[in-house]
Image (tube, coloured by chain):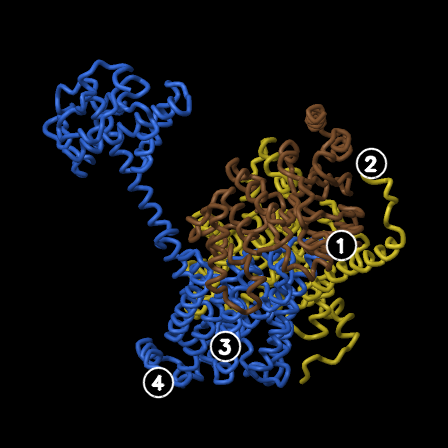
Chain colours: A blue, B brown, C yellow
Amino acid sequence: MASLTAEAAKIGDLTQTRWTEQAWRFVSLADPAVRYACLGTVLLGIVCGLLGSFLVVRRMALLGDALSHAVLPGVALGFLWNLEKDPVAIFIGALVAGLAGSATVSLLTRTTRLKEDTALGMVLASFFGVGLCLMSMFQRLPTGNKSGIETFLFGQAAALGPGDIRVMGSVALVVVLLLVAGYKEFLLVSFDPGFARVLALPTVWFERLLVMLLAFAVVSALQAVGVVLVSAMLIIPAATASLLTDRFHRVLVWSACLGMVSSLSGAFLSFLGTRLPTGPFMVLSASLLFAMALLFSPRQGMVPRWYRQRSQKIRIDHENTLKAIYQVLEAEEFTGETVTVAALAARRRVAPAAAAVEIRSLVSAHYATLSGDRVALTPSGWQRACAIVRNHRLWELYLTHTAQIAADHVHDDAEKIEHVLGEATVRELERRLPRIDTDPHGRPIPSLASAVAGQPASGGASDRPLGYGGRS
Amino acid sequence: MNPEKPPAELGVPPLEIHDLTVAYRNKPVLWGVDLVAPAGQLIGIVGPNGAGKSTLIKACMGLLPCASGWVNAFGKPLSQSLGRVGYVPQRESVDWDFPVSVMDVVLMGRYGKIGLFKRPGAEDRRIARECLEQVQMLPFADRQISNLSGGQQQRVFLARALAQESDLYFMDEPFTGVDAATEAAIIALLQGLRSRGKTILVVHHDLPTARTYFDWLLLLNMRVVAFGPTDQVFTSELLQKTYGGRLTVLSEVAEAVGAKAR
Amino acid sequence: MTLIPEFQAQRVFVEPWTTELGSHGLMALVTFLVGATCGLIGNFLILRRMALVGDAISHSVLPGIAVAFLITGSRGVGAMVLGAVVAAWVTHGLIEVISRHSRLKQDAAIGIAFSTLFALGVVLIAVFADKVDLDQDCVLNGELPMIPLEPAVRWGGWVLGPPPVLRLGVILMASIALVAAFYKELMLSSFDPGLARCLGVRVGMIHHGLMFWLSLTVVASFEAVGAILVIALLILPGATASLLTDRMWPRLVWSTVHAALSAVSGMHLAVALDCSPAGATVVAGAGWFVMAWLFSPTEGMIPRRWRRRSAAIDSRPRSSEFGQNA
């Protein structure tokens, strides 16, 4: 804790400031430390977002976790180099440790029967343990506490210096250039490594390059996010991106943008207080964006999906009620134009109160009007009712005629299909069936052309005696 | 069926396997496979479960380490002639939720020809569209691959192999889990390829259709039981030898077939 | 001062068992208790391929503990356990919601859920630093060196030891009793949940019970070794045991042996290097794992390589043995 205070004090010499002042200092970018912090977080957001996309689409999210914990001993050894915060030495140390960690995972899964999750967990924890041991040894040293190694655990964007920015900038440049140049190869190696080998691509080298870039990403984000939470900055923006789009190049772009936004806002939030670590705030911002995408993403989101399901259910309810009204009218041989709520309830086999609710819903959708206890269909309601009855009966006819299914087996199927038959399918059915005036149960099929408002299904069908026969 | 057809290169077999042995964890799965495939034929690989059919193909493609033996294609080690070899892996070998479109997947077939670090060009897109057209999947080109049925996924894989423009094809169970229409479409396509002089090896698990689909058959049960033109190999005796006494239904099929052939 | 203290055999090997028994010996006892308890559960986690669920829960109990602190204002054991169990449930629920309602797979769902909760926990601790008697160092390292300083519990003239030791001892005993009582059900539901359900085993109950017990163990161990190293003690003993034997009972025994070995050798390592005792225990445990990896009679790399070489001399059976009667 003491060292975190020290790092915070480095930015401004006041340890207690009002948060509005701090916010202004951040937004105005007047302070060089703030500029470095912003630049650094933007770079790390891009790099982590890009590389994290590979982890998420390849279902290797936990490799990122293992890799990011495994770099800790390397960070500690990087410090050991000359006992101060030398970005290049730390970068090299962490890179070596990260690669050693991923090599150990693959060695473990190849030579033992341990499953990958166990191997990942072991490497994560063991390497981290070694790192903690080394760090606790440094802390005894007279210079140890001042070196700021502790900021590597939970991150301190404010501690970024020009040296860090140079390292992060070159990492970002290398990552972006390699991904642009080798997009096609990285895509194939991730999607279908077997096929990549068959095409004589140097698959193994691309795999290694990817792990190497991943280690780059982890290491360049260490200072600002911290060892413990780097994996979250790899996974969460990429997972959010994969909820928003389903093309890989777009996942990459979205993920980089989301990474940038969440790391910047995390840095901003942690800057408002005095002794706050940056990493957790970045992760929480990223998680917030993820939650928004999970809930509201247009195609995948839970709320739009729920809304679509609900409106579909309302439509089906409307259609069922309309159909029942039509059937009641039909049972009265279209002598009247209105039906009573009680007759409708009997037809729908529901309580009158429930039928009244259904009718109110129809009225509010302008499909029917209610006067007293009698319901009359509006022109649009009549059209809709005819269409749905027609769908139902056409489908029954199709099943008995073409699929040779017995007439008493087709009703339940038609009950479901009637709501989803599209215009084109109905046309197709009409074309295929030789005769479309009566259904297999002998009831007339209403036609759409003659569905005049308020009039019973005409076109002659209802005037003729029921049953098979008539024109072919 | 028509051995007079000119092979791709006179005298050089498209595929030659010599003494191929593959082992999983010290247990042999394939033993001493010797094979010289004739050019321009549609070759079916059949055998019981666990006979090493897919293993044979994967070992040929270099996806599994071989304990011994070598595989040549067009007179050169297969690793050197990969540019002339197409491959259709099993459908389950990839994650169909991956965020790529049908077009992207078919373009992958061109990657070997495009070369490292280069982008697919207009010509590659044209070829990919043609291949999609051949498997009747062009209307789906912009769909994400998770929205496809099993048969459609298989067609996409087939289109990808077509885009490789190879002379020798390996296909691992292309008929598994596809609808009848797709199966018919695939076999028509394979016969079309064959008539253009390509050699195609197909792992197949359905014995009755194997007889009608393929010109040559490889009966495999850890080692080669028989390899030859279908009418010579598809005999009750050889099938019995391949499948052992395990499946009586199959031996009945074989007998019925044998009776018909006689 | 130097990085690595001068090696003195007396200080490293003898004193912890004589003059320093009250502190170092007790620390070794605590890490053994933690390792043995975690090892027992860890074996089942590995069997059920849930090693990383252990990882997730050991991270995500943090906000639960922090909130419990904020509400009660003290280190009450009951509140901490309650907070941690609630946090574990929330993690579990988040993983379910994410993997069920989106196209993301389990791994990404786990990664998102636990890192979010862990970040929340760290933020709570940092923002309310003056109100919470926890710091970020404790999250990582635990407070092993503090345990011997707590006043010991006395009962009728007997000195029983500091409260954390008693708690861990009770949890270990209870774990052994639970595993013995539900051994059959645990095995069956881990190996073949479908069959278990057919035979009337409440698979869901077993799963949730295991999760509950896991969060309890994690909370109790948290104090000793910190959040992240718990995962090491959950996985290392079980993984080592699985290299030594392929039967479950011997595995449970071996994992306890591994816990004891790494507790003692970790303590010596910590004394020798003067470093974090929790970290040293993990390093020692990883060391024992590497030993098993290299030298295990059945699975070890070196015995296997040696066997392969001797087997390669004549491995190919005559061809007549194959094919004809296959």
The local secondary structure at tag 3 comes to helix
Q: Mark 4 packing: few (<14 Cα in 10 Å), some, or many (20+)?
A: few
Looking at numbered disc 3 in the image, what kind of residue is underneath it?
Answer: Leu
Looking at the picture, tell me which residue is in the foreground, A23 or C171.
Answer: A23
- Which image quarter is the C terminus of chain B in? top right
Would you identify the image quadrant in which residue A331 lies? Answer: top left
Q: Nearer the viewer, mark 1 or mark 3?
A: 1
State the CA–CA distance, disc 1 to disc 3: 41 Å
Element assignment for label 2 = loop
Name the amino acid type tagged 2. Gln
The amino acid type of the residue labelled 1 equals Cys
Residue A414 percent across, percent down from the top left: 35, 27
Query: How far is mark 2 from mark 4, CA to CA?
Result: 84 Å
Which of the 4 image quarters holds residue C5? Answer: bottom right
Label 1 element class: loop
Q: Which residue is mark 3?
A: A173
Q: Residues within 10 Å of mark 3 (few under 14, many from 20)?
A: some
Indicate which disc residue A30 carries: 4
Which x, y percent locates residue A345?
Answer: 23, 24
Q: Residue at x 36, y 26 (%)?
A: A398
Q: Position of residue A244 (x, y in %)?
A: 40, 57
Residue C324's label in the rendered image is: 2
Q: Give the residue at the far left of this rendering.
A: A371
State which tag comes first along the sequence, 4 or 3: 4
- Asked if badge 4 and badge 3 are on a common chain, one would say yes
Where residue B165 sits, quadrant-wise, is bottom right
